[in-house]
């Protein structure tokens, strides 16, 4: 089973998101956060989170890049419980029991996306606000294969 982990290539996420995700934490699209947003909500760091932020499911911070990684069932269970509690605490779900199937579905959808890719595949997300709601697009960043002779100087 595969899910996505937050990765950082530099410190930019620390500056562009209100709350940056921690390197290595499990991530989802997190588009549900924007389901009732309007154009007036899209300014500053909130716009950045909307435009290209994955949601860390441990800190509930945002990150620009994720990479696919193996995940164990026990980790999925813990993430589901934490996300369900987040739905109660932040979004007013009536109970953890009521929120658990929704949390499980969010995680399952992300696992489906990650299952199509090899471990360590890097992904970004882009969102647009449309008449029909939030549209998400995921971009895969292919690794560049390089031969050793591109980096080594060979003598006679």
Image (cartoon, rainbow, N blue to C red):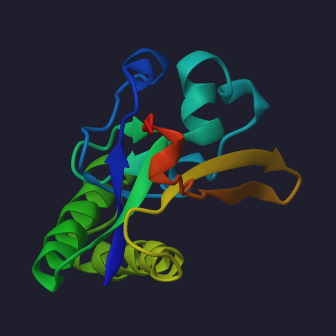
Counting labels gives 0
* Residue at (38% x, 73% y) in the render: 107
Q: Position of residue 31 (x, y in %)?
A: 56, 55
The quarter of the picture where the C terminus appears is top left
Q: Position of residue 130 (x, y in %)?
A: 85, 50
Occupied quadrant, residue 111: bottom left
In this rendering, position of residue 119 left or right of residue 52: left
Please determine whether, in this image, residue 148 is positioned above or below residue 22. Answer: below
Residue occupying the far right of the picture: 131
The quarter of the picture where the N terminus appears is bottom left
Q: Position of residue 20 (x, y in %)?
A: 35, 30
In this rendering, position of residue 11 left or right of residue 35: left
- Compare residues 87 and 153 and report the one nearer the observer: 153
Please determine whether, in this image, residue 69 is positioned above or below residue 67. Answer: below
Please determine whether, in this image, residue 94 is positioned above or below residue 57. Answer: below
- Compare residues 141 and 77 and report the one nearer the observer: 141
* Residue at (28% x, 77% y) in the render: 100
* Residue at (70% x, 47% y) in the render: 127
* Residue at (63% x, 27% y) in the render: 47
In this rendering, position of residue 137 left or right of residue 88: right
Please determine whether, in this image, residue 14 is positioned above or below residue 86. Answer: above
- Compare residues 17 and 84 and report the one nearer the observer: 17
Q: Position of residue 11 (x, y in %)?
A: 37, 20
Occupied quadrant, residue 46: top right
């Amino acid at each position: 089973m595969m899910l996505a982990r937050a990765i950082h290539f530099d410190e930019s996420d620390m500056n562009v998101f209100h709350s940056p995700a921690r390197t290595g934490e499990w991530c989802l699209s997190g588009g549900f956060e924007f389901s009732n947003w309007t154009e007036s909500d899209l300014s500053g760091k909130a716009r950045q989170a909307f435009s290209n932020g994955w949601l860390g499911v441990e800190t509930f911070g945002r990150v620009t890049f994720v990479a696919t990684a193996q995940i164990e069932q026990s980790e999925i269970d813990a993430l589901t419980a934490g996300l369900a509690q987040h739905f109660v605490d932040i979004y007013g779900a009536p109970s953890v029991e009521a929120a658990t199937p929704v949390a499980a579905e969010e995680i399952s959808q992300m696992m489906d996306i990650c299952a199509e890719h090899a471990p360590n595949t890097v992904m970004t997300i882009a969102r647009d606000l449309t008449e029909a709601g939030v549209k998400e697009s995921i971009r895969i960043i292919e690794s560049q294969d390089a031969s050793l002779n591109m980096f080594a100087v060979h003598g006679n």
